[in-house]
């Protein structure tokens, strides 16, 4: 499946001989342009502290469906957990602390 939106995990369907076929990339931006659609992406799991940003044709990539679904589920759980934490803090009266910060 060809990438078509931001947030998908992708890999090259035919990597060069010197590239690892298991390298994964995160789609940062999808630029629609008929059959010349492009993807701005960032490499995942690199040894560099600041992995570079690449722009390639979308037709050269395929979506890693399983990893993309895992990422989406992880982000959903984080949102749910954040809502629960905020609700618990409100039940404990933590919202009063915010008003005290304003006064000081």
Image (cartoon, rainbow, N blue to C red):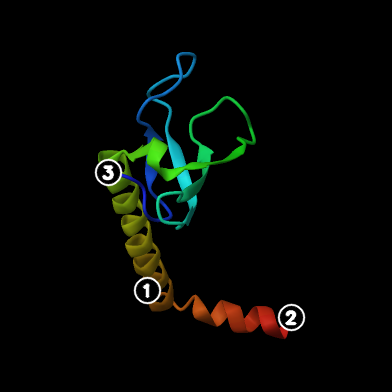
Could you tell whether 93 is left or right of 2 in the image? right
**How many residues crowd mark 3 within 10 Å: few (<14), some (14–19), many (20+)?**
few
Mark with earlier residue (2, 3): 3
**How many residues crowd mark 1 within 10 Å: few (<14), some (14–19), many (20+)?**
few
Q: Secondary structure at mark 1?
A: helix
Q: Which residue is mark 2?
A: 104
Find residue 89 and report its horizontal and vertical position in percent.
43, 71
Extreme residue in the front direction: 35
Give whichever of 90, 75 is nearer the camera. 75
Find residue 81 and report its horizontal and vertical position in percent.
35, 61
Rendered view: 3 above or below 24:
below
Q: Secondary structure at mark 2?
A: loop
Q: Secondary structure at mark 3?
A: loop
Find residue 35 and report its horizontal and vertical position in percent.
40, 50
Mark with earlier residue (1, 3): 3
Q: CA distance from mark 1 to mark 3?
A: 39 Å
Find residue 48 and report its horizontal and vertical position in percent.
62, 28
Rendered view: 87 above or below 20:
below
Could you tell whether 29 is left or right of 60 in the image? right
Q: Which mark is residue 1?
A: 3
Q: Which residue is mark 1?
A: 87
Q: Residue at x 59, y 79 (%)?
A: 98
Closer mark to the observer between disc 1 and disc 2: 1
Rendered view: 38 above or below 24:
below
């Amino acid at each position: 499946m060809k990438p078509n939106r931001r947030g998908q995990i992708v890999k090259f369907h035919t990597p060069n001989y010197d590239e690892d076929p298991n390298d994964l990339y995160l789609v940062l931006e999808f630029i629609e342009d008929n059959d010349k659609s492009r993807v701005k992406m960032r490499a995942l799991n690199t040894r560099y502290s600041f992995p570079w940003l690449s722009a390639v044709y979308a037709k050269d990539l395929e979506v890693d469906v399983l990893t993309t679904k895992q990422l989406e589920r992880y982000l959903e759980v984080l949102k749910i957990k954040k809502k629960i934490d905020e609700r618990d803090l409100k039940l404990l009266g933590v919202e009063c602390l915010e008003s005290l910060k304003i006064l000081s």
